[in-house]
Amino acid sequence: MKRILALGSLLMFLVACEKEKVIVGDSERLRFMEQEILAMIQDKSCQGERICGTIAFGSKPCGGPWKYLIYSLTPAEVEVLREKVEDYNVLEAEVNHREGKISDCFMVSPPPVTCLDGKCGSIE
């Protein structure tokens, strides 16, 4: 009987540890993905083929994005950015659901952007 209890306790401990690894792993993965996305859009210059735009970033538990990122990229780079942000948003939504996270339900809108003095930025 003691062996069964010990094995049961060990199994519960291992399951808890594995769940913790997933949570920590996903948090680290989200952090890495965000850093990669922010590095990609760091240059806000809007000259030549580069275009200004916004993209919904993050996934609030209540729905919608946390914010909009302003970028200046070539059309090909915009497609790569969209894929990276979509992957990020999907993973964050999964984490939110799994962990039962909550948020405000305030809906953010994309800021109007323009190219002014060679840099993309919000008009507001």
Image (cartoon, helix red, strand yellow):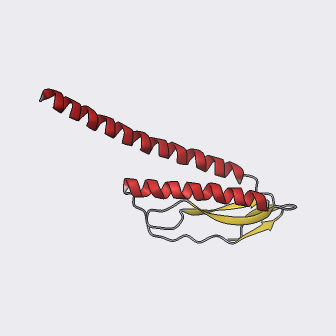
Name the residue: 32% across, 39% down.
15
Residue with the most extreme top position:
3
Q: Position of residue 70 (x, y in %)?
A: 68, 62
Residue located 54% across and 59% down the image: 58
Position of residue 70 in the picture relative to residue 58 (left or right): right
Tally of numbered tags: 0
Q: Position of residue 11 (x, y in %)?
A: 27, 35
Q: Quadrant of residue 109?
A: bottom right
Q: Quadrant of the N terminus?
A: top left
Residue 123 x, y percent position in the rendering: 71, 71
Q: Considering only vertical position in the picture, is 76 above or below 12?
A: below
Relative depth, front residue between 47 and 7: 7
Residue at position x 51%, y 54% from top? 91
When the figure is inspected, residue 65 is found, relative to residue 6, above or below; the finding is: below
Q: Residue furthest right?
A: 48
Q: Say which quadrant the C terminus sits in.
A: bottom right
Task: Name the one closer to the observer, 49 or 66.
Answer: 49
Q: Is residue 119 above or below residue 10?
A: below
Q: Residue at x 44, y 62 (%)?
A: 61
Q: How far from the left and from the top, in percent, is residue 122?
A: 70, 67
In the picture, measured across the screen, residue 23 lies left or right of residue 88, that is left
